[in-house]
Amino acid sequence: MSAAAVPVIALDGPGGTGKGTVGLQLAQRLGWHFLDSGMLYRALALQALRQGLAMTAEAALAALVETLELDFVRPGPMAGRALLAGEAVELRSESCATAASRLAVLPQVRQALLVRQQAYRHPPGLVADGRDMGSVVFPDARLKIFLTATPEERARRRFRQLENMGIAARLSDLIEAVNQRDARDRDRAQSPMQSALDAVVIDTTGLSRAAVLRRVVTLWERRACVL
Ligand code: C5P
């Protein structure tokens, strides 16, 4: 099967819409591969911070993509943990997300990461989550979904997530961080976060993850029937 023939489901949208969880569950249900593209941006940011690179050093950051050794543990109790050159690392912190969104505005970095993301397309299929999966990385995806939710709801979800991890945070700070990251992702010149023209938009405000997953599965079953 050529890579282009491998079906892709693209799941885009801002952080805190549950696309990571929904995407992983969808991939498990279909027996497909899963790409959480934000992890690539976060891993690059962490590696750059460790090497003392500025998040604006475009050529050096793009070159760093070539040497980035990123793997994910699966399956087992450590499933989903990122391994940077074999070392388990924490990429979910707010500081990592902020650094990632700063280097994500750089065209050379996005270009270098494009090929790496496309390399995850293997049979029998790929569920890819991010900001530009349907619009840029996999424009031929069989199904494109764009998840949204109000910034307040997304900040509340993040607050609960941090609380469960035992990390103290202020909701007002999280709302501000969500708004700032949205603005950076939406307003950048290259591959801004936007819903592809042919994407189905689902507003997840007030919906449980299980309800969102059900909607996505129904959309895919309908789509798969007519393809
Ligand atoms: O999805 P996640 O919150 O892990 O992404 C972290 C940051 O990486 C985003 O705020 C965004 O700036 C960047 N990103 C991107 N394109 C993607 C995935 C992530 O620009 N496909």
Image (cartoon, helix red, strand yellow):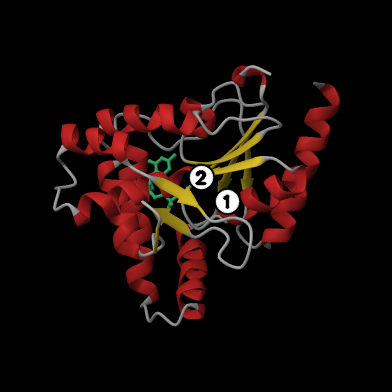
Residue nearer the viewer, 32 or 23: 32
User: Mark number for residue 227?
Assistant: none
The amino acid marked with disc number 1 is Lys
Residue 24 against residue 200 in the figure, above or below = below
The image quarter containing residue 6 is: top right
Residue visible at 60% across and 58% down in the picture: 205
User: Mark number for residue 13?
Assistant: 2
Bin the neighbour count of mark 2 within 10 Å (Cα to Cα): few under 14, some 14-19, many 20 and up: many
Bin the neighbour count of mark 1 within 10 Å (Cα to Cα): few under 14, some 14-19, many 20 and up: many
Q: Residue furthest front?
A: 86
Residue 120 against residue 78 in the figure, above or below = above
Left or right: residue 189 compared with residue 145 = left
Residue visible at 43% across and 32% down in the picture: 116
Secondary structure at badge 1 equals helix
The image quarter containing residue 210 is: bottom right
Residue nearer the viewer, 205 or 125: 125
**Do the numbered discs 2 and 1 sit on residues whose CB atoms are within 8 Å?**
yes
Residue visible at 36% across and 65% down in the picture: 93
Quadrant of the drawing holding the N terminus: top right
Labels 2, 1: front one: 1
The amino acid marked with disc number 2 is Gly
Residue visible at 82% across and 33% down in the picture: 222
Residue 70 position, x and y percent, is 41, 47
Residue 226 position, x and y percent, is 83, 23
Q: Name the residue under label 1.
A: 19
Residue 109 position, x and y percent, is 28, 33
- Number of labelled discs? 2
Quadrant of the drawing holding the C terminus: top right
Residue 72 against residue 8 in the figure, above or below = below
Q: Residue furthest right?
A: 225
Q: Is mark 1 within 8 Å of ligand 1?
A: yes
